[in-house]
Amino acid sequence: EPEVTQTPSHQVTQMGQEVILRCVPISNHLYFYWYRQILGQKVEFLVSFYNNEISEKSEIFDDQFSVERPDGSNFTLKIRSTKLEDSAMYFCAIKDDSAETQYFGPGTRLLVL
Amino acid sequence: AQSVTQPDIHITVSEGASLELRCNYSYGATPYLFWYVQSPGQGLQLLLKYFSGDTLVQGIKGFEAEFKRSQSSFNLRKPSVHWSDAAEYFCAVGAQYAGNMLTFGGGTRLMVKP
């Protein structure tokens, strides 16, 4: 099973601040995803990323959000100006081209005050 | 649009008892189906998946699930529950194209009585 780590594991930030969440796959993968889970709610898709560009995004993924692979390895999710409602667990997932299963990282718990 | 319903928000079973967690999906074609488990404060671990072929699939930790196209269901089962199975279980559906997003159900929280 492919491994993926996420940093930080927890982050507390003030409303209006920028945050960057990182996803580090242990080996090379083609597809990357971000999902979030607001406390007590279902896991929701945010965005998928393939071949260095966004392939699909949800309504949640508005102009406040961006993704990139700055060094060809880490996959980052940036929230430009955090809102209280951005408080959630954010999960990164990876997938190979030859398989259909997404493997999830342990998540980053973001708390916006 | 695809959707997933997990009718049971909470389920409590006694240790050693059998378990069935329900999952119904809505999708226009044959979907990819998954069950993930989330222990408190942890990420999502894949339990099992269905893509095609045999409709009864086996997963880790003694879990199995059966795909029933006529009922649009993919219920998760385990013949004998262990206390360590206490967790939240998520059913998810994905479309059959590369890079597909997953749509999750609301989850079922399983509690195990000693």
Image (tube, coloured by chain):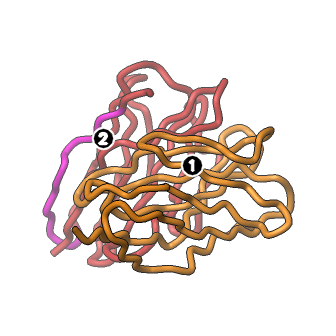
Chain colours: A red, B orange
The residue depicted at 75 percent of the width and 47 percent of the height is B55
Quadrant placement of the C terminus of chain A: bottom left
Name the chain under label 1. Answer: B
The x, y position of residue B112, in whole percent, is 29, 68
Q: Is residue A3 left or right of residue B57?
A: left
Q: Amino acid at mark 1?
A: Glu
> Bounds of the magenta span?
A4-16
Where does the image place residue A67, in percent across and percent down from the top left?
45, 45
Is A1 left or right of B21, judged from the image as shown? left
| Residue at the (43%, 32%) spot, across then down | A69
The residue shown at (41%, 43%) is: B61
Residue B109 vs residue A110, the one in the foreground: B109
Q: Residues within 10 Å of mark 1 (few under 14, many from 20)?
A: many
Position of A4 with respect to B62 (left or right) is left
Quarter of the rendering occupied by the N terminus of chain A: top left
Percent across and percent down for residue B48 are 55, 44
Q: Position of residue B16 (x, y in %)?
A: 35, 60
Q: In the rendered structure, does residue A54 fall within the stretch colored magenta? A: no
Is residue A8 shown in magenta?
yes
Q: Are marks 1 and 2 on the same chain?
A: no
Q: Is residue A74 above or below residue A60?
A: above
Q: What amino acid type should be assigned to the residue bearing mark 2?
A: Arg
Q: Is residue A71 above or below residue B33?
A: above
Q: Confirm whether residue B110 shows in the render.
A: yes
Say which quarter of the image contains residue B14: bottom left
Residue visible at 19% across and 67% down in the picture: A111
- In which image quadrant can residue B84 be found? bottom left
Q: Nearer the viewer, residue B3 or A46?
A: B3
Which residue position holds label 2? A22
